[in-house]
Image: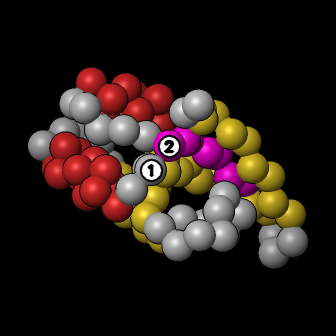
Amino acid sequence: MTYNCYITFPTIFYAIRAEEILKTSSYSAKMVPVPRSISSSCGTALQCNCNDVFSIKNHLLDNNCKIEGCYKIGEEGLNTLSIEELFKDE
């Protein structure tokens, strides 16, 4: 199964802020549309390596960037999808 991890944000402001924060770090991540399996609303999420998701989350929080949630999505073939909520801000 192939896995991708996503970090979502409460507003587009924080998504842009996260992108700026990560430009000066060694983490590899990219901005993508929020996958429909996470939310049907339009928005931007950060896609990153699942091995780095918690380090990236902590780095963003340490730099005053609010996060809505972290998700791990697994895909196998076209029809099998698993979503694991790793972190959700209350």
Which picture quadrant has residue 76?
bottom right
> Which quadrant holds the C terminus?
top right
Residue range (magenta): 68-74
Question: Is 33 situated left or right of 35 in this image?
Answer: left
Residue under numbered circle 2: 68
In the rendering, at what x and y percent does residue 87 appear? 59, 32
- Give the mark, 1 or 2, whose residue is nearer the N terminus: 1
Which picture quadrant has residue 72?
top right
Residue under numbered circle 1: 10
Front residue of 40/71: it is: 40
Q: CA distance from mark 1 to mark 2?
A: 5 Å
Which SS type dominates the magenta stretch?
A: strand
Callout 2 amino acid: Glu
- How crowded pointer 2 is (Cα within 10 Å; few <14, some 14-19, many 20+) is rated as some
Residue drawn at 44 percent across, 50 percent down: 10
Question: Is 32 situated left or right of 75 in this image?
Answer: left
In the rendering, at what x and y percent does residue 77 appear? 81, 70
Magenta highlight on residue 70:
yes
**Above-or-below relation of 53 to 2:** above
- How crowded pointer 1 is (Cα within 10 Å; few <14, some 14-19, many 20+) is rated as some
- Which SS class for mark 1? loop
